[in-house]
Amino acid sequence: MEARSKPPVLTAGGRCSLPVLTLLLLGFVAPLVAVIAFSFAEPRSFAAFSSFTLANYREIFDPANTVWMSFAWSLGLAGVTVALLGVITYPIALGLVRVFGRWAPVISILFVFPLFISENVRLYGWVLFFIKNGVLDGTLRLLGGSGPEVLYTPAATLFGMVYTYLPFMLFPTVLGLSLLPRDVVDAARDLGASRLQAWWEVELPLAMPGILIGTLLTFVLAVGAVAESKIMGGQSLIVITHDIEIAFTYSQNWPLGSALAVLLTLIIGGLTLFALSKLDLDRILGRK
């Protein structure tokens, strides 16, 4: 008689990972599948999984549709936000790692503390600061001048995004710099490298994992930003997340909103993979 094959038995690691896998399936995979299914449903219906049509995607790709301006604004603002934060946060991170000493934890708390307050509340605080007859304008009027027209412009939206996502770029950069062996930089200087050469050839590549994590995290969050354009920009520009929100709420067109969300996910994923393909991750992570 042939011996019966034993059913596969999960290893201890497999059993321990079941709660995490279940959470990922319910919290990530299932909603994503639902969104994809809705994107192929009949427009202005809730017939997901029971109908299939490309009408929603045809509407998006219709030359008369201006939704691509929203995509362009979202991606452009996110890219500029990342570039500005890269310039702003690197000196701060360098100071937290090497300069501020025992005061570094206190300064770090100052950057973390705003995250405990609602983003909308913080943005409305800036509105009160910049609005006509507000803090800035009132102070300048007392000095004989007047405040600049800042609010409800694309520049105000960009300012709000830079302010909101600064911690998400700062702390991964701090992590990257904190893992940098100081003696390696000193050795480069001892071997005749200038300060700029040591930074470019040694310090920056070794700190790049943290910078790369901060860049990707900030870019993904910034593309999905909507409060900044509403509160500080006054909808002087329309971002794609606003179009998605309108489709799911006022328009009650869930299939169109789902199709926009799927396209946004594909664009972000494609750009991320393209950026990673252009980077030598083995060199950045010190594998060669």
Image (cartoon, rainbow, N blue to C red):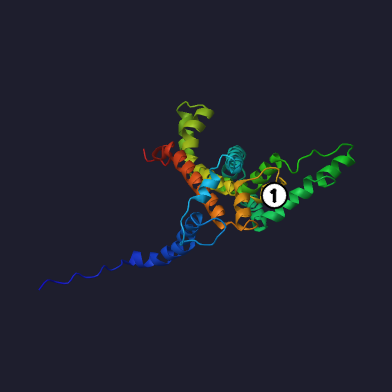
| Quadrant location, the C terminus | top left
Q: Position of residue 40 (x, y in %)?
A: 48, 54
Within 10 angstroms of label 1, few (less than 14), some, or many (20 or more) residues? some
Q: Which residue is mark 1?
A: 230
Frontmost residue, 264 versus 161: 264
Image quadrant of residue 3? bottom left
Amino acid type shown at disc 1: Lys
Q: Nearer the viewer, residue 85 or 273?
A: 273
Q: In the image, is 247 to the left or to the right of 269?
A: right
The quadrant of the image that shows the N terminus is: bottom left
The residue lying furthest to the bottom in this view is: 1
Q: Is residue 31 left or right of residue 71?
A: left
Residue for point 52% across, 57% down: 42
Picture coordinates of residue 117 (x, y %)? Answer: 68, 57
Q: Is residue 180 visible?
A: no
Q: Is residue 12 above or below residue 81?
A: below
Residue 241 percent coordinates (x, y) = 60, 50
Residue 280 vs 102, above or below: the answer is above
Residue 120 lies in quadrant: bottom right
Q: Residue furthest left?
A: 1
Q: Is residue 118 above or below residue 185?
A: below
- Observer-nearest residue: 27 or 191? 27
SS label for mark 1: helix
Residue 49 position within the rendered picture, expressed as x and y whole percent measured from the top left? 46, 61
Decide if residue 287 is in sight here: yes
- What count of labels does the image hold? 1
In the picture, measured across the screen, residue 257 lies left or right of residue 126, that is left
In the image, is 117 to the left or to the right of 187? Answer: right
Determine the residue positioned at 79% across, 50% down.
128
Which residue occupies the foreground of this view, 119 or 274?
274
